[in-house]
């Protein structure tokens, strides 16, 4: 669609406000405005519609101008599981824009979306987030968004759609952008087609360069895995077609094309319909994701752990698409709350998730049921079929994400924005749980999702009441922290009493005198220990039971989405450092290292992704990568003590199988950097950078100050004493080089 307009004076400033029910690209005088992709991103369009604002002063000139737009289905009109198309509103697609011109005289003029716009069919025949895009280059109309173009009979006046009732709000989070290009690692002829391997699972699309006759169709099919014959295997994508087509216009100089309004999760693309064999330069992988800035970088001296981090980072990139999704490839790509809940600690190390969280928490509040229960996906495309109840571990994201974000950045505004919703959620559980056990109102109870021993997805390998009550305690502890931080004294007292009530009820119901918890599952032990639900006199016994369980199984975890993220913290806290590294460095199935050794470039949804149920088997799912939060905190040694890293702890879990570690993290006060080495003789060295307005509590493997050198001299920093066999030092802002003799 397009509209001619005239700027009647010199333009001092021009701002474009734009959004759509659908996805849009806007143009002024033939040039693209901004670089946001797939905007507006996924949301409940019946409640909120986000717009963006662009400074287009340099794009508008005095005299004749044109504003144009392309609009496609986007998140509004595409198939959304399980509602189908138009999950959050009715057709048609709609576009809304306001171009505000401020002339040098101070006069303001507005160009808006009204009846003066003209519309025409574009070369995009079909475009769907999940299914792909079909494009016919023969239908292109060169110059359609530039001055001097004369619309022909293909163009007609636009229709004015009914007004929407949803709130229009500005977008606070960074847009989805093109974030990189990947070159083809290999091209192979398979069954008359060409299969391209980019060597990396990622989210985006393929950009192609082709030459042929007008009307020739090129088809691109995307997949994460291959069939035995080398062709792409799309079985795990379920209903998502993940296929793009391009019909050539016959340009003898060749044609370059990439889609605009779809994306795929893939490593491989199968191309058919080419006239000639492609070269690596003819096919490029375009990487897209929300442009959240990188804040963390791990450097661990073991390839398994380092690759695991890189894989989890790629999964985070692939699933940060305006909202945090579960997967980028199959017919879901939804804002699953449980996945985000467990991964946010790691996510907030890797990237700045402040405004990203703020934006998604608005979706979480939109999806909250009137009774206070948080939904298990946000935006809630299943609102017509799912019960209005809370799923333990999934609904808790509504509390844990604001808590994590406040902890990471120190800004209590995220607490205040969500306090009412969080309080209503805790109240929902309390109203159902007079006895201190959350046993009712679980809704779709996913439990310890995809635990190793589960016979089917959602099989309860750990008692659901145990998990529900542990999650309730988890969220209550977070509410206590946030109430204290925002000086809500009455709430702090109420939540403290509630936590004590849950502790007593849990211990009575699930903690037995012999140290067994629940049915003896690993996740039962882990959650009970992690959330302080075990009476102090039984902690050692319970931790020993967990240790024995893991060792008796062959030193492997049987945990799923809820137990796995906390497993290593619990073991480290209870003195089982060697077992921590046994699990981290294990390469046999099931383990993180097994994925790495199988050539994974992202984190799998399942421990047995290479042999699991194809209907629930994503190869790009960040939940099991939540362990990276532990690696940042407990191996690299950047562990926050106070919100915003005003104080942090360096206390790495050490093992001579890993000779070095460290990380850099860009905190709100500046860059924190740790870099340690441990040689075979036991000599330890730490290079540490502490930014302004920050203090570090440094635990060094020594019990005698004379064994420690600081910047080549005797220890000068203040010693806080010996704790658990380590010398604890207080370090203020500055750079340090500590050396410890064995």
Image: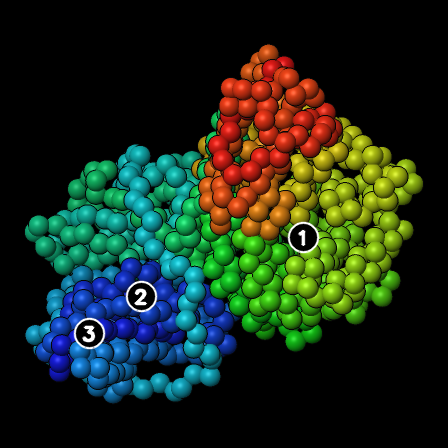
Residue drawn at x 63%, y 31% as measured from the top left: 718
SS of the residue under disc 2: strand
Q: Which residue is mark 1?
A: 458
Cβ–Cβ below 8 Å for labels 1 and 2? no
Q: Disc 3 on helix, strand or loop?
A: strand
- Image: 279 above or below 168: above
Q: Which residue is mark 3?
A: 12
* Marks 1/2: CA–CA distance: 36 Å
Tag nearer the camera, 2 or 3: 3
Which one is earlier in the sequence, the residue at label 2 or at label 3? 3
Tell me how far mark 3 sits from mark 1, CA to CA. Answer: 60 Å
- Could you tell me residue 30's position as x and y percent? 16, 67
Point 59% across, 12% down: residue:
681
Q: Quadrant of the N terminus?
A: bottom left
Q: Nearer the viewer's eye, disc 3 or disc 1?
A: 3
If you read the primary sequence from the N terminus, does the residue marked by circle 3 or circle 1 appear first? 3
- The percent position of residue 28, horizontal first and vertical second, equals 19, 70
Residue 52 appears in which quarter of the rendering?
bottom left
Spatial distance from mark 2 to mark 3, Cα to Cα?
Answer: 40 Å
Query: Label 2, on which residue?
Result: 126
Seen from the viewer's position, the closer of residues 470 and 11 is 11
Residue 171 seen in this snapshot = yes
Query: Where is residue 46 drawn, in percent x and y?
Result: 49, 77
């Amino acid at each position: 669609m397009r509209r001619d307009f005239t700027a009647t004076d010199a333009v001092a400033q021009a701002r474009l406000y734009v959004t759509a029910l659908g996805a849009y690209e806007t143009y002024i005088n033939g040039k693209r405005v901004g670089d946001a992709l797939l905007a507006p991103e996924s949301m409940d369009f019946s409640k909120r519609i986000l717009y963006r604002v662009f400074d287009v002063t340099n794009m508008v000139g005095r005299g004749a101008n044109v504003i144009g737009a392309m609009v496609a289905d986007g998140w509004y009109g595409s198939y959304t599981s399980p509602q189908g198309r138009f999950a959050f509103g009715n057709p048609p697609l709609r576009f809304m824009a306001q171009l505000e011109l401020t002339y040098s005289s101070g006069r303001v003029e507005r160009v808006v979306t009204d009846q003066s716009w003209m519309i025409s069919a574009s070369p995009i025949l079909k475009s769907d987030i999940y299914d792909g895009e079909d494009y016919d280059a023969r239908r292109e109309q060169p110059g359609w968004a530039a001055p001097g173009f004369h619309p022909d009979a293909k163009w007609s006046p636009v229709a004015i759609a009914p007004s929407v009732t949803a709130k229009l709000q500005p977008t606070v989070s960074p847009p989805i952008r093109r974030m990189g290009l990947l070159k083809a690692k290999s091209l192979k002829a398979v069954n008359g087609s060409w299969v391209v391997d980019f060597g990396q699972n990622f989210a985006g699309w393929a950009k192609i360069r082709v030459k042929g006759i007008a009307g020739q169709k090129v088809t691109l099919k995307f997949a994460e895995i291959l069939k035995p014959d080398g062709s792409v295997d799309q079985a795990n994508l379920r209903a998502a077609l993940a296929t793009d087509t391009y019909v050539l216009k016959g340009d003898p100089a060749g044609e370059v094309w990439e889609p605009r309004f779809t994306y795929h999760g893939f490593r491989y693309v199968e191309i058919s319909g080419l006239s000639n064999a492609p070269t690596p330069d003819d096919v490029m992988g375009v990487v897209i994701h929300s442009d959240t800035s990188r804040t963390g970088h791990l450097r661990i001296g073991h390839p398994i752990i380092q690759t695991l981090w890189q894989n989890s980072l790629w999964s985070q990139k692939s699933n940060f698409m305006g909202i945090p999704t579960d997967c980028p490839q199959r017919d879901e790509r939804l804002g699953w709350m449980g996945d985000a809940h467990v991964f946010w600690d790691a996510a907030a190390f890797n990237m700045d998730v402040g405004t990203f969280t703020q934006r998604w928490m608005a979706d979480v509040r939109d999806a909250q049921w009137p009774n206070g229960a948080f939904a298990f996906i946000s935006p809630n495309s299943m609102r017509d079929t799912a019960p209005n109840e809370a799923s333990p571990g999934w609904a808790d994201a509504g509390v844990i994400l604001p808590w994590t974000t406040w902890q990471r950045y120190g800004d209590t505004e995220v607490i205040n924005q969500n306090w009412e919703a969080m309080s209503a959620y805790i109240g929902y559980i309390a109203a159902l749980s007079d006895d201190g056990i959350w046993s009712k109102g679980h809704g779709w109870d996913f439990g310890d999702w995809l635990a190793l021993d589960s016979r089917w997805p959602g099989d309860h390998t750990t008692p659901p009441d145990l998990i529900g009550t542990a999650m309730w305690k988890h969220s209550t502890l977070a509410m206590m922290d946030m109430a204290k931080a925002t000086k809500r004294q009455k709430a702090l007292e109420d939540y403290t009493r509630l936590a004590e009530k849950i502790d007593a009820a849990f211990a009575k119901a699930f903690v037995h005198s012999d140290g067994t918890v629940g049915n003896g599952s690993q996740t039962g032990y882990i959650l009970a220990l992690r959330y302080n639900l075990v009476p102090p006199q039984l902690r050692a016994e319970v931790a020993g039971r967990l240790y024995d369980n893991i060792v008796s199984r062959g030193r492997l975890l049987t945990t799923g989405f809820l137990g796995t993220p906390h497993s290593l913290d619990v073991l480290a806290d209870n003195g089982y450092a060697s077992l921590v590294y046994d699990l981290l460095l294990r390469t046999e199935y099931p383990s993180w290292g097994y994925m790495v050794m199988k050539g994974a470039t992202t984190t799998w949804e399942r421990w047995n992704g290479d042999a699991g149920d194809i209907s629930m088997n994503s190869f790009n799912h960040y939940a099991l990568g939540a362990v990276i939060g532990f690696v940042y905190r407990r191996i690299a040694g950047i562990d926050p003590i106070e919100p915003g890293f005003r104080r942090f702890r360096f206390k790495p879990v050490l093992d001579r199988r890993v000779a070095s570690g460290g990380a850099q993290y860009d905190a709100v006060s500046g860059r924190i950097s740790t870099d340690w080495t441990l040689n075979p003789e036991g000599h330890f060295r730490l290079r540490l950078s502490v930014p302004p307005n920050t203090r570090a509590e440094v635990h060094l493997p020594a019990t005698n100050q004379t064994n420690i050198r600081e910047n080549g001299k005797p220890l000068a920093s203040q010693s806080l004493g010996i704790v658990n066999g380590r010398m604890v030092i207080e370090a203020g802002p500055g750079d340090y080089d500590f050396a410890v003799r064995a």
